[in-house]
Amino acid sequence: MILIDAVSKRYPDGTTAVDRLTLEVPDRSITVLVGPSGCGKTTTLRMVNRMIEPTDGRILLDGRDIRDRPVNSLRRSMGYVIQHAGLFPHRTIADNIATVPRLLGWERRQARTRALELMERVGLDPALAKRYPYQLSGGQQQRVGVARALAADPPVLLMDEPFSAVDPVVRKGLQDELLRIQADLGKTIVFVTHDIDEAIKLGDMVAVLREGGKLAQYAPPSTLLSAPADEFVEDFLGVDRGIRHLSFFTSAGLELTARPIVALDSTAEQIRARTIPQSAYVLVTDTDGRPLGWAHAASRAEGGDELVPHGHAFVLGRDSLRSALDSAVLSPTGWAVAVDSEGRAVGVAAQETIAAAIRAAHAEQGTAATRVAAGSSGEGARG
């Protein structure tokens, strides 16, 4: 565990970058520091590996003050990823990844083997090993940066806005890759971003900082969205925080109907039999059951082949109610299409059905919170 204990950073000109910040960063989790420009996010991160020395307070790593360790040894025990990857332009990709292992005295062959293993882990083709950074895309360079940070298997990974310089599609892929790697490796990650959506997606815990390096709130993402500490946090989260909160409600158990689903080769009788009163549409699938689009039921029964795009489907049980609602809103019929992990249609859900599921999820969350509060109260009474 990393303990940031009443840490401040003040500069000679009187600027306070961080003001008595106290945080406990849990082991094997992703803790995200988020906030407006000038709130001390990067300064805090750099104090963890002593690139910046605090003015007051202390930082403990597994109970030991980091000032008691040689600074080079400390930094080599922590992976560090920054914007634009920070790769050495004159070294090959494999040699970039092997930098820290070589500094630690690994033999060249051992370090190269490790580099190739990590290229595969972060989703890079090992055939790129002999290329140079300029020959890779921005997203590929960021993956190299992550691989290099993981090369010596450090328990702690520090990441300073690592995905902010790439386009949204690549960024989403890198975020998903980080979550996959974290599920496998279980590092202690401190991640800096200015993007609240990225913080909500990645963080097990999120620290919202104000300008001047003061802590506004430190909580799991779901708590942050449902109960912001004050007006500053509420404004920073944005007007659509209720929609974001739906990301924490599972779509498992959502009531579906398969009645409007028809195969591409269905007969007119089969189409008429499957049309439901509330909808003049049927969802047409290919012969493997994957959705192709919506069609007017009457037209389809008479041999019409025009299809209306179904928008995007959501994976039942894996995706959230936010994804289900988004699917319904984007659908021309108002029905969300649910698929299994193989992409086969398993049913559709009306907006009204999803709204009912959202109300039920809120009610269940409220009941759970009441139980927790009652339990805490009872423990206090017993104490």
Image (tube, grey):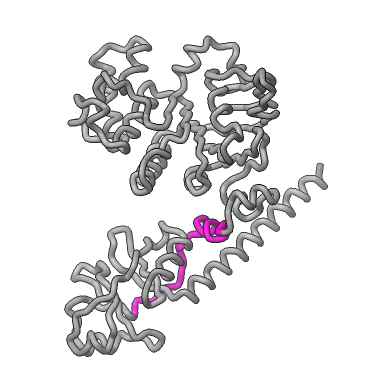
> Would you place residue 242 above or below residue 293 in this image?
above
> Would you place residue 132 above or below residue 236 in this image?
above
Give percent across and percent down for residue 279: 37, 84
- State yes or no: residue 258 in magenta: yes
- For this view, does 202 lie left or right of residue 360? left
- For this view, does 309 lie left or right of residue 6? left
The image quadrant where one finds the N terminus is top right
Res 195 seen here: yes
The image quadrant where one finds the C terminus is top right
Residue placed most toward the observer, 111 or 227: 227
- For this view, does 351 lie left or right of residue 296? right
Give percent across and percent down for residue 6: 70, 26
Residue at 28 percent of width and 59 percent of height: 342
Residue at 31 percent of width and 23 percent of height: 97
> Would you place residue 102 above or below residue 168 in this image?
above
Residue at 62 percent of width and 44 percent of height: 219
Give percent across and percent down for residue 171: 38, 44
Majority secondary structure of magenta residues: loop
- State yes or no: residue 256 in magenta: yes
> Would you place residue 21 above or below residue 326 in this image?
above
- The magenta segment is 240-259
Res 1 seen here: no
